Amino acid sequence: TRTIDLALIPGDGIGPEVTEQAVAVLRAALGADADLRTTEYPYSARHYLETGVILGDDDLAALAKHEVMLLGAVGGDPRDPKLAGGIIERGLLLKLRFAFDHYVNLRPTKLFPNVTSPLANPGDVDFVVVREGTEGPYVGNGGSIRVGTPAEVANEVSVNTAYGVERVVKYAFDLAEKRRKKLTLVHKTNVLVYAGSLWARAVEREAANHPSVAWDYLHVDAATIFLVTDPARFDVIVTDNLFGDILTDLAGAISGGIGLAASGNINPDGAFPSMFEPVHGSAPDIAGQRKADPTAAILSTVLLLDHLGLADAARRIEAAVTADLAERGPTARSTDEIGSAISRRLGAD
Ligand code: NAD
Ligand code: IPM
Ligand code: MN
């Protein structure tokens, strides 16, 4: 039988709570299709405070040997001055995305049957945000001078390369071709003219290779309107790293909550392991209370399985989650109760 060699990074806060359930569900879904070998890594804010190391070169080398990765969430106590400036988020999460060239940050949004959206008439919500994952304002190209004085200047430069934009745009068109053949470029070409022009030309050029895909363009501010007034209009959205971050929290909210939003940080070329994780963070406000919904982490394993070509197991988890969501009553369940209910539907005892 096939063996999946998974690197597991539970992380901080609710991260370990939700990945525990996700791994159990993954194991139950695989059954006899494949063995799951997990290797756990401690990288997290907690690990940094204990060891002084966030993620070293040897750590990256160890992770690179695995086939695929599952991450819970990282980020410690926001009041801790030792963690200021997103040192963990940048030094761990973004470092992994950059080092492993996760240029596709895949974030599907679907309103599952019987799930309540905060929108009165959401319609048939089923779209995917293809968020660029290695460039934009995330690269740390910036600096400030005269800090703390009235003359302070702070620059944060968004880096967009033709190589980086074209490859993610191509991925998005290929995906649209396999779906409902609609693609929307979201940017801010009326203000961010240099990057905007690069993105627009990349889309126009790639559109010529995908004549069956109808595409349009929205400024990011208008896109937030339509995500609330008519989210069913979207199929594939392709966008910049920062716009994609913001839009996908909104997408999570309209489709029943951030506790359901899954993502994959994908290196489509297969040169590095791809990494799957819920869209949400470590949620310090509910950590340790078993209140976190593990569904986002569980749905991230669906993306993981599809990435590995294990579509049957992926569909089994999707079906189990769909059924669990459809039957969720008004009574709140704990992280473990939701996870075990889904595992049981997959035959676990
Ligand atoms: P967050 O996503 O952790 O929490 C936002 C809100 O959503 C909170 O009220 C939280 O309780 C709720 N929430 C999140 N996940 C939930 C779940 N599974 N079930 C139920 N409710 C859930 O975002 P934040 O508060 O902005 O960030 C907290 C920390 O996490 C910060 O350090 C941030 O940098 C980090 N972060 C990490 C990741 C990641 O590791 N991928 C992603 C986002 C934020
Ligand atoms: C996400 C998170 C990260 C991001 C942070 C924690 C760096 O918000 O995965 O959406 O901005 O990409
Ligand atoms: Mn985010």
Image (cartoon, rainbow, N blue to C red):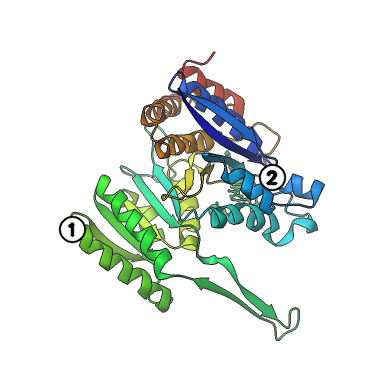
Secondary structure of the residue carrying numbered label 1: loop
Question: Is residue 338 at least partly visible in the picture?
Answer: no
Counting other residues with Cα less than 10 Å from the Cα at mark 1, is it few (<14), some (14-19), or many (20 or more)?
A: few
* 190 vs 217: above or below: below
Q: Amino acid at mark 2?
A: Tyr
Q: Position of residue 92 (x, y in %)?
A: 64, 52
Q: Nearer the viewer, residue 315 or 334?
A: 315
Residue 201 position by quadrant:
bottom left
Q: Badge 2 is on which residue?
A: 43
Give the quadrant of the N terminus.
Answer: top left
Q: Which residue is mark 1?
A: 211
Q: Residue 272: which disc?
A: none
Residue in the foreground of this view, choosing between 326 and 319: 319
Q: Residue furthest bottom?
A: 151
Q: Amino acid at mark 1?
A: Pro
Name the residue located 76 percent from the left edge and 49 percent from the top edge.
Answer: 48
Q: Position of residue 106 (x, y in %)?
A: 43, 49
